[in-house]
């Protein structure tokens, strides 16, 4: 099987993030593989181990994304591709990413593409479905189980707390949700092997694209952190008095009544 994984480098939301003049300060931010993409990497490795083939991890980004690609290789992926946009693009959006990936996959034989359900930095959930549309390929989102039997694929997907069962065929694109698997940690032997695995680097010129082809369709107006939570109040006294005080606070302070 020719198995591809779409991977994104995202900042770690568990770490402190500083925003200055509407931009995230890269120097102080910790970057990781988008957690939902880790489910995709793990499932790709499982599919390869069961059915044979090769796992290639692909990302669109800057030179720093090589670290996350190497992590995916250490987990067990076979190859990695960095489509480096550092010198060609100042800004990008989901349209940009999909346009580049569409060109990348144009002449490649694909059995299955796996991606994360969303990226934790922007959470649009658009790249996977939009790419599938551009490649004229069926897709299923938020999967929690996948079973491949020849060209037939049986999938379970999360639908707001319930499960939907889908039968489809290869080639196919899926986006992966928590519950699909438990991503492995890279082992020391895996880390050592990853250093020798191929990591190819392309630029948009290599894909016969120019800057006008990938100009973003959206613009980010502002990035800001949510306001810090205010300390709560504990109401005391008789229940009737607490209710009166609560109503008064909702009117005068919160202004929701």
Image: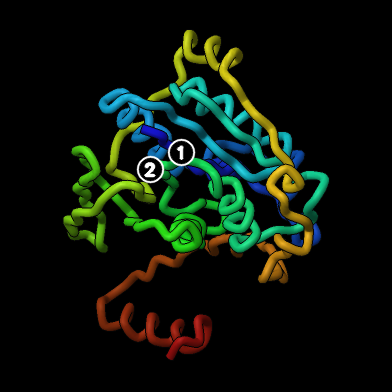
At mark 1, the secondary structure is strand
Residue drawn at point x = 50 percent, y = 87 percent: 255
Left or right side of 47 for 105:
right
| x and y percentages locating residue 25 in the rendered image | 75, 47
Left or right side of 108 for 165:
left
Say the numbered circle drawn on residue 194.
none
| x and y percentages locating residue 99 in the rendered image | 61, 58
| Disc 1: CA contacts within 10 A as few (<14), some (14-19) or many (>=20) | many
Whether residue 42 is visible = yes
Whether residue 163 is visible = no
The foreground one among 43 and 233 is 43
First reached walking from the N terminus: tag 1 or tag 2: 1
Badges 1 and 2: C-beta atoms under 8 Å apart?
Answer: yes
Tally the numbered discs: 2
Residue drawn at point x = 46 percent, y = 20 percent: 186
The foreground one among 140 and 117 is 140
Q: CA distance from mark 1 to mark 2?
A: 6 Å
Residue drawn at point x = 32 percent, y = 24 percent: 52
| x and y percentages locating residue 244 in the rendered image | 35, 86
Residue drawn at point x = 25 percent, y = 56 percent: 158
Q: Quadrant of the N terminus?
A: top left
Q: Which residue is mark 1?
A: 4
At mark 2, the secondary structure is strand
| x and y percentages locating residue 78 in the rendered image | 48, 23
Q: Which residue is mark 2?
A: 112
| Disc 2: CA contacts within 10 A as few (<14), some (14-19) or many (>=20) | many
Q: Classify 14 as above or below 44.
A: below
Q: Residue 138 lies in what quarter of the image?
A: bottom left
Q: Quadrant of the C terminus?
A: bottom left
């Amino acid at each position: 099987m020719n198995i591809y994984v779409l991977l994104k480098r995202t900042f770690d939301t568990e770490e402190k993030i500083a925003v200055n003049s509407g931009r995230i300060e890269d120097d102080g931010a910790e970057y990781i593989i988008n957690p939902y993409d880790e489910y995709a990497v793990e499932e790709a490795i499982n599919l390869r181990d069961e059915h044979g083939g090769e796992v290639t991890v692909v990302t669109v980004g800057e030179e720093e994304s090589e670290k996350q690609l190497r992590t995916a290789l250490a987990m067990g992926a076979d190859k990695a591709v960095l489509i480096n946009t550092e010198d060609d693009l100042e800004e990008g959006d989901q349209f940009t990413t999909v346009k580049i990936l569409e060109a990348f996959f144009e002449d490649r034989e694909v059995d299955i593409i796996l991606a994360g359900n969303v990226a934790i930095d922007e959470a649009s959930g658009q790249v996977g479905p939009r790419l599938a549309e551009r490649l004229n390929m069926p897709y299923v989102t938020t999967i929690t189980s996948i079973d491949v039997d020849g060209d037939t694929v049986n999938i379970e997907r999360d639908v707001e707390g319930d499960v939907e069962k889908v039968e489809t065929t290869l080639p196919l694109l899926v986006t992966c949700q928590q519950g699909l698997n438990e991503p492995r940690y890279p082992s020391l032997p895996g880390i050592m092997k990853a250093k020798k695995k191929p990591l190819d680097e392309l630029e948009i010129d290599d894909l016969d694209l120019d800057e006008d082809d990938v100009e973003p369709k959206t613009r980010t107006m502002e990035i800001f952190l949510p306001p810090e939570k205010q300390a709560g109040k504990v109401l005391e006294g008789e229940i009737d008095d607490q209710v009166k005080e609560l109503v008064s606070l909702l009117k005068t302070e919160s202004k929701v009544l």
